[in-house]
Structures are given as structure tokens and as C-alpha cells.
Amino acid sequence: MRMKSRIAVMSYGRFTNVLRSTISKEDLEKLIIVESSFEETKDIAKRLWNSGEADVFVSGSSNLQMVKEVISAPIVPIQISGFDIMNNLLKASISGGKIAIISYKKPISNISIYKSILNIDVEEICYNNISELKILLKELRGKGAGAVIGSSLVCDLCDELGMNSIFIYSSNSIKNAISQAIQIQQSIQFEKYKSKQFNTILNYTYSGIIATDKNNIIQIYNPMAERIMGIPKEKVIGQNADHVIENTRLSRVLASGRQEIDQLQNVNSRIILTSRIPIIVEGHKEGVVATFQDVKSIQKAEHKIRRELHSKGLISKYSFNDIKGNSKAIKNCIEIAKEYADSDFNVLITGESGTGKELFAHSIHNRSKRKNEAFVAINCAAIPESLLESELFGYERGTFTGARKEGKIGLFELAHNGTILLDEIAKIPLSIQARLLRVIQEKEVMRLGSDRIIKIDAR
């Protein structure tokens, strides 16, 4: 995930020069360096924050305090270490004249300690605005000050007055501030990505989703929920679920803490298939999430899936002659597959998408003793979980609303005496995998809604 330049550095001339000579080119590309007058700093920072151009700000003392007054953004201060102060005091002492250290509104902490350690006389001065700062500097010049220690603004004004100045921030302090800002900005970008991802899932899933908090107040109500329920989002968010949507049972699940899976429910004259899951955090019930689908939509999806399955046919289309390749690896795979084809064992075919797993499955079937029987292929990942079980194992009549009156034969039964290819088998829910394992081991199935075991012989 490429990070845009969303870190604003509120700067003046001296600071910018040190920044450009200290920070790598790669990190400089992540910065918006703002050189402005003292009076413009607030307005520019406010504009960058409100427009979304900057997520994080980096600043020294004077700009830091001004920016804090107008925005609530993360602001990384450039810290002045004790080593920086002592090093600057030693540099200033070489000038031989009076030393002044100037800061915006508040004095720098522990200056008296460093003065005592180094036995250097230093005048501490604070200013409240740029006009006052200019007056103070002129007075210091008149007194013959040898060196002035301060921020970039202080140093820039000293240059204009021909005074000796020392920039208070070290290269390491600036590097550390920029590094911290980059980390914060990366975290912000990641959170934005996760939020966008979450909202995309909510907005484009085929299931309606409602989530409530511990007081049964609706916090999440996605577009599909709005469509199924027929109630606008504006009338639902922030309301008690029991007061705005009939028969949700969310308060009951919240009270019991027990999940309800695949329940048929009548809501607003619609039959829906719903699951309600309590949100448990460290043993405390903090809310409920409900996912649901209109049964009519499930039926339409089922019809579409069946049409696609039938249009695909129950015959194998390919043989080993259709597998192209001259490499040692592919030839070795073909030879192994032929050996498996001559046996009647179940076969697990693994490989990346597009490497020809289905082609090998067709070929194994066409070489086996089952080649004149059905070849049934199903992409397990393409079928909704609520339909997958009925497709694999079939169902009896009256098993659920919308089911065929005569029931339905499952794909394992269709593959009797032949071969069934379960593509993307790892995507099958664990609950269905457990049942699938029994079918593979015992070679018998039981349709949904039935108590009768059906023997099958499918590879």
C-alpha cells in the first residue's frame, strides 16, 4: 500500500535547509514542507487538515503551539534533548559575548541545570508574537549579544539583523520526529484502508447485516438489510432494534448469549434465513450481529446455480493428450496421474490457480474404469454456505420453504459410479467438511430432512 504525501512539516528557512540535508530522498517524498510567515501558519495548517491533504503535522515549538490551537490532528513535536542544549550552549560560548536562548511563550525546561553544569551565563527570553520577537532581537543586538540560540524563525530573523545564531534543533531530533510522523501516518493509512475494506464488505455483500450494541441500539445496517427490510437507514441507525424492526429476536440473543444459526423468520411479511451471533468480549455481552437473506433470493440463486451445473453437463471433456508441456516436471505429473487413474483411490490435487487442476481431474476420470460414467464438477467456493449442503447431499421434499416439492438429488448421488470433482474444497465450512469426510470414508449420504442412508460409489 503506497503512502501518499500526507505529512505536513510547518517550517521556516533554516529548518527547511537542515531537513533537506538530513532526511533521505525517499522520506522527503512523503512530506509536504510548508514555509510560511508566522501569521499564515494557523490558516495553512487548518486548510491542510480540513481538506484532508495532511494526516499528521511536524513542528517546532512556536508553530506547534499555534497549530494546536486550530486543529485536532496528530502533531509530532521536534524534541530538544539535553545533549542538544548543552552542545548549543558550548557552541555559543565560543563567541565570547552574551548568550541568549529564545523560546515561544514558555521557557525551555531545565535550562538552569545546564547553565550550572557548564558554568555558562545564559539569558532566557520568551516571546508571544513576531513583533515582540523582532524588538527583543534588536535589543540584544544593541547589547552586543554574542550568540542567540533559537528556532528556525529566530535564526532567520537573526540573519536579517546580522546576528550570530545557533539553530536549537539537532539533525537527530529532526530525524526522530520525521520517523515518528511516518509511523503514525502509516498507521492512519492502514486504519483508513481497513475501514474502507470493512465498508466495502458491508455495502456489497449479498447478505443483510444488522449489528447492535449492548443496549440493543443498532450501530450497523447495511444496504442489503435496508433493501430486505424495506426501512430506510436513517430511521434505524441509533434506534433500539425492537422499536424499529419487528421480530428481530436480537434482544433475546443479547440476553441469552446463545447464537441462533440458519433460522427461518418472518419479518415485515418476508421469509428470511437468518443467523444471530452474540458479541462476547472478555465474558461480557457487548452486542449482537445478525446476517440474513431473503429466501426468494436464495431460491433464485439456487435456480441459477442448478442451471449452470446442468449446462456444464456431467461428462468429462479432457484427456491427458490435452495437457500441453514438455518440461520434466509436467511429464512427471502426468505419469503419476496416470498411475492414480489406474487405481480407484480418491485423489487430492493441489496447485495454484490456473495450473490445470481440473484438467488433470478430467484426464484421470477419462483414463479410469469409470470413464463411461458421470463426471460431476462443482466449485465449492462459488456456492453460498446456505446452499452448499443441499447441493452436495440433496434434500427431501418439504425440508425448507421454497424447496422442490419432489425433493432434490444431491451431486454425490449424481456422481454415483462416476467421479466428483470438489474444486476449492478448502473453502467449505468445517461443519460441512466433517460431513463430507464421512461421505468419502463410508460412501454413503443422507439427504437433508431425511433419516434414510443412501449408498453411493463415487470417486
Image (cartoon, rainbow, N blue to C red):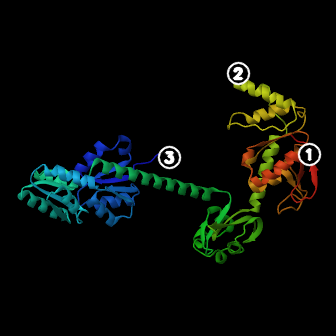
Image position, residue 405 (x, y; %): 89, 59
Q: How far apart are marks 2 and 1 (CA)?
A: 38 Å
Q: How far apart are marks 2 and 3 (CA)?
A: 39 Å
Count of numbered badges drawn on the protein: 3
Residue count near mark 3 (Cα–Cα under 10 Å), binned few <14, some 14–19, many ≥20: few
Tell me the residue that label 3 is attached to: 1
- Which element type, helix, strand or loop, lies under badge 3? loop
Task: Look at the numbered discs 2 and 3 and tell me whether their residues touch, using CB distance below 8 Å.
Answer: no
Q: Which amino acid does label 3 sit on?
A: Met
Tell me the residue that label 1 is attached to: 456
Q: Distance between the residues labelled 3 and 1?
A: 50 Å
In the picture shown, does residue 259 fall above or below 91? below
Image position, residue 102 (x, y; %): 19, 60
Q: In this view, does 237 lie to the left or right of 88?
A: right
Residue count near mark 1 (Cα–Cα under 10 Å), binned few <14, some 14–19, many ≥20: some
Decide which of tag 2 and tag 1 comes sooner along the chain.
2
Residue count near mark 2 (Cα–Cα under 10 Å), binned few <14, some 14–19, many ≥20: few
Image position, residue 381 (x, y; %): 72, 48
Q: Quadrant of residue 50?
A: bottom left
Tell me the residue that label 2 is attached to: 326
Image position, residue 423 (x, y; %): 75, 42
Q: Quadrant of residue 115?
A: bottom left
What quarter of the picture does the C terminus occupy?
Answer: top right
Residue 70 in view of the camera: yes
Q: Which amino acid does label 2 sit on?
A: Asn
Residue in the picture at 76% in, 33% down: 359
Decide which of tag 2 and tag 3 comes sooner along the chain.
3
- Which element type, helix, strand or loop, lies under badge 2? loop
Relative depth, front residue between 93 and 24: 93
Residue in the picture at 81% in, 49% down: 306
Task: Look at the numbered discs 3 and 1 and tell me whether their residues touch, using CB distance below 8 Å.
Answer: no
Q: What residue type is labelled 1?
A: Ile
